[in-house]
Image (cartoon, rainbow, N blue to C red):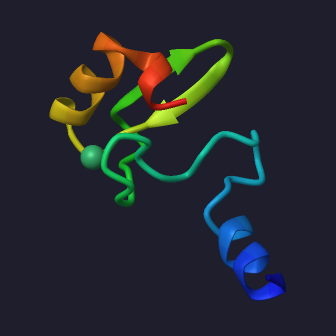
Amino acid sequence: MSMFNSFFKRHVNKKDGSPSKDPVCGMRPTDTITSVFQGVTYKFCSDHCKEQFDADPNQYT
Ligand SMILES: [Zn+2]
């Protein structure tokens, strides 16, 4: 379990606590495609994923 926890922590952005992976597809996101939901900034790998997230944010949070 400790291995899993350290793996998970590496995928969290320490600066602002926001997820550092695309919540839609789970891939590594860019810094330029973002959406703010409930005060948390989510980053996306593509406009397509951002559109999916914006359509139904609760499904991905
Ligand atoms: Zn994506």
The image shows residue 44, relative to residue 2, as above or below, that is above
In the image, 25: left or right of 21?
A: left
Q: Point out residue 51 in the picture as x, y percentages from the top left corner.
A: 23, 21
At 68% from the left and 53% from the top, the residue drawn is 13
At 68% from the left and 15% from the top, the residue drawn is 39
In the image, 48: left or right of 9?
A: left
Q: Does residue 7 show up?
A: yes
Residue furthest out toward the left? 48
Q: Point out residue 52 in the picture as x, y percentages from the top left corner.
A: 24, 24
Number of marks present in the image shown: 0
In the image, 53 versus 39, the foreground residue is 53
Residue furthest out toward the bottom? 3
* Quadrant where the image shows the C terminus: top right
In the image, 50 versus 60, the foreground residue is 60
In the image, 21 versus 4, the foreground residue is 4
Task: Give residue 12's quadrant in the image.
Answer: bottom right
* Quadrant where the image shows the N terminus: bottom right
The image shows residue 2, relative to residue 40, as above or below, that is below
Q: Point out residue 48 in the picture as x, y percentages from the top left corner.
A: 16, 32
Q: Does residue 35 show up?
A: no
Task: Give residue 4's quadrant in the image.
Answer: bottom right
At 55% from the left and 52% from the top, the residue drawn is 20
At 77% from the left and 54% from the top, the residue drawn is 14
Q: Point out residue 34 in the picture as x, y percentages from the top left corner.
A: 41, 29
